[in-house]
Amino acid sequence: MEFDRRPEKRGRLEYEEALTRRDEAQPIAHTGHHYMEHERHDRGGAAVQAGSGPAPINTYVNGTTRAQSPPWREDDKDGHYVFELGENITPRYKILSKMGEGTFGRVLECWDREEQDYVAIKVIRNVQKYRDAAMIEIDVLRVLAKHDRTGSRGCVRLRGWFEYRKHICIVCDKLGPSLYDFLLRNSHRPFPVDLVRDFGLQLLQSVAYMHDLTLIHTDLKPENILLASSEYIRVPGYKSSQPGKHFAYIPKSSQIKLIDFGSATFESRHHCSIVSTRHYRAPEVILGLGWSYPCDMWSIGCILVELCTGEALFQTHENLEHLAMMERVLGPIPLKISKRVDRKAEKYFTHRGTLNWPDGAISRDSIRTVRRMTRLRNIIMQSVDHSAGLLIDLLQDLLKFDPSERVTAKEALRHPFFSDQR
């Protein structure tokens, strides 16, 4: 399973266009279409346009309309389900929009006729390995739901699943945009620190809940943290990079939901060697030292920095450069870590156990990129107007090189950053 690069589909045109249309009419609005879950890579497939294709097929029985399934179509070359807007997936669900597309399938916004509500349906590709992965995700979602009857633990709620024309379909609540969507819409302007505190508190609560169930998420990132609501407030006084737009967007509600459990792993199950999207990957994963719950905590540290600054902390695609960036921001990798790396990672270090940098750099540009980075304290002080000291202290606990010294989710929840809001 490939996690090495950031998803190319991070630009969400549907979301941006929906915001733009509503900006012209009112300062507070609902956006139209959002991703329910974010996969890791695009695999082709053109966006479906409203009004294309045949009208939905219905029959009339005793004066009432009964929704019918569309004509049979072959899947596309990648095994994706082919559909038209306005059609039905079973008589229960009417397709309203395409919300997203990724490695595992497509996410569709649908109208649930039985519940009279909007839902998001993840339609899995008709490829066996993705079908197998979907069943694992369903099992994880069931476990999360079983121990969270009220839905208060901050994980997306599984409404049900079914198989339709050889495609596994996972039905969940329809949510708002991801935290990355908001950063993107604001031209990567960071969130206020008070919002970051709210987001961080909820994220840690959700992860602590997962860890109590012996589940490790393994793919925490802003794309996989969704706002529960699409409502936002337009705040004046911010000079955007977009001509004529001197305002920013702030979520009207800070409530979030954690999504995408397709890579979640029980602690007792097999651990593949590589997990996490590159930017949020813990050093023990890169160095082949094995991983467990602490890899989620490292990802949370990277996420909090990104929410405060507007940009990913480690923007790289290469292991040695990534490790050099870590050292630039956090200090040298301890010898007790570098001396235990697996054979594949030995090439990143000298015989003395120090990082082979800059001698091992792939280019001068790579050296310049790392050199431009600064220490964690400076990064936060430049971006946070208050509570900076407490946040820096929390981040230093989250971003320790040694996973055994890294703070746990429950310990992080007790940090003064979340209790002292001066």
Image (cartoon, grey):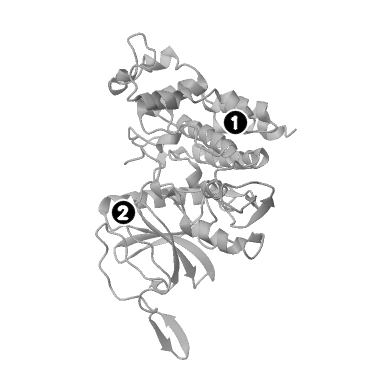
Q: Residues within 10 Å of mark 1 (few under 14, many from 20)?
A: many
Residue 401 appears anywhere in the view:
no
Q: How far apart, in angstroms, are the residues tagged by discs 2 and 1?
A: 36 Å
Q: Which residue is mark 2?
A: 131
Q: Are marks 2 and 1 in contact (CB under 8 Å)?
A: no
Q: Can I make out residue 21 in this image?
A: yes
Q: Amino acid at mark 2?
A: Arg
As drawn, the label of residue 412 is 1
Indicate left or right for 49 with 165 as reference: right
- The residue sitting at the top extreme is 352
Q: Residue at x 45, y 40 (%)?
A: 217
Question: In screen coordinates, is 105 left or right of 383?
Answer: left
Q: Which is nearer the eye, 121 or 25?
A: 25
> Which quarter of the figure has residue 315?
top left
Q: Relative to residue 283, is residue 174 drawn left or right?
A: right
Q: Residue at x 66, y 63 (%)?
A: 26
